[in-house]
Amino acid sequence: MKRPVVPIVASVLTVALIALLVYGITSRGQDNTLDDAVKQGKLPVAPGATISQPNLQGGGSTTLASLRGKIVVLNFWASWCDPCTEEAPVLEKAQKALARDGAGTVLGATYNDTPNDAKAFVREQGLTYPNIRDVSTKLAHEYGTDKLPETFVINPQGKIVGISRGQLDERFLTAAIAKARATR
């Protein structure tokens, strides 16, 4: 019993095309340029310094450039992100320490979140640090952020000294802030 060649070839080509498509989608990966530079001990300039984003609570907008001269702990988060909830107390503790001596601030940046849900999250977590609405994830894109939470510690000169992709812990944040303080 002979099988027609055309359907077999068409099936093989279809499977190959699907495999190439899947490979293309999964191999894109995230941009690790900033991560690689920090791991090598370099201090890359924090991108997106002039991108102006509206303040979550209203009343204008904020840019990273407006915070130059201060340590900035830039944290991308969302109200629907469970690890973001878990790390919120660590960030709030860091905010209190940075504010106490005027060294800097934590700056939260919402990621694909509605303003009402984000405001409720800030209220429920008792967060005192400023937050911006990263409209269309424009700022997150500059940092290669596509998973949450992600945190970037920026020294007063506007250079990244620490990156946490995923839920951060107090040990990482304390060490990164100390590194930022040492480069003032």
Image (cartoon, rainbow, N blue to C red):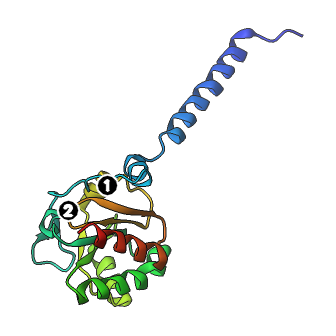
Q: Secondary structure at mark 1?
A: loop
Residue at the front extreme of this rendering = 182
- Residue named by callout 2: 157
Residue at the right extreme of this rendering = 1
Residue 116 or residue 56, whichever sits in front:
56
The disc, 2 or 1, on the residue closer to the chain's N-terminal end is 1
- Residue named by callout 1: 43
Task: Please tell me in which quadrant of the rendered image residue 67 appears.
Answer: bottom left
**Residue 164 placed where, x, y %?**
44, 64
Residue 19 or residue 65, whichever sits in front:
65
Distance between the Cα atoms at labels 2 and 1? 10 Å
Whether residue 75 is visible here, answered yes or no, is: yes
**Residue 42 placed where, x, y %?**
35, 52
Q: Which residue does the image show at 22% across and 61% down from the upper left?
A: 158
- Decide if residue 126 is on the left or right side of residue 184: right
Number of other residues with Cα within 10 Å of mark 1, as a class: few under 14, some 14 to 19, many 20 or more: some
**Residue 152 placed where, x, y %?**
35, 64
- Decide if residue 183 is on the left or right side of residue 10: left
Q: Which residue does the image show at 58% across and 26% down from the upper left?
A: 17
| Residue 136 vertical placement versus 104 (above, below) | above
Whether residue 109 is visible here, answered yes or no, is: no
Residue type at tag 2? Gln
Residue type at tag 1? Leu
**Residue 106 placed where, x, y %?**
29, 76
Q: Are marks 2 and 1 in contact (CB under 8 Å)?
A: yes
Task: Please tell me in which quadrant of the rendered image residue 21 appears.
Answer: top right
Q: Secondary structure at mark 2?
A: loop
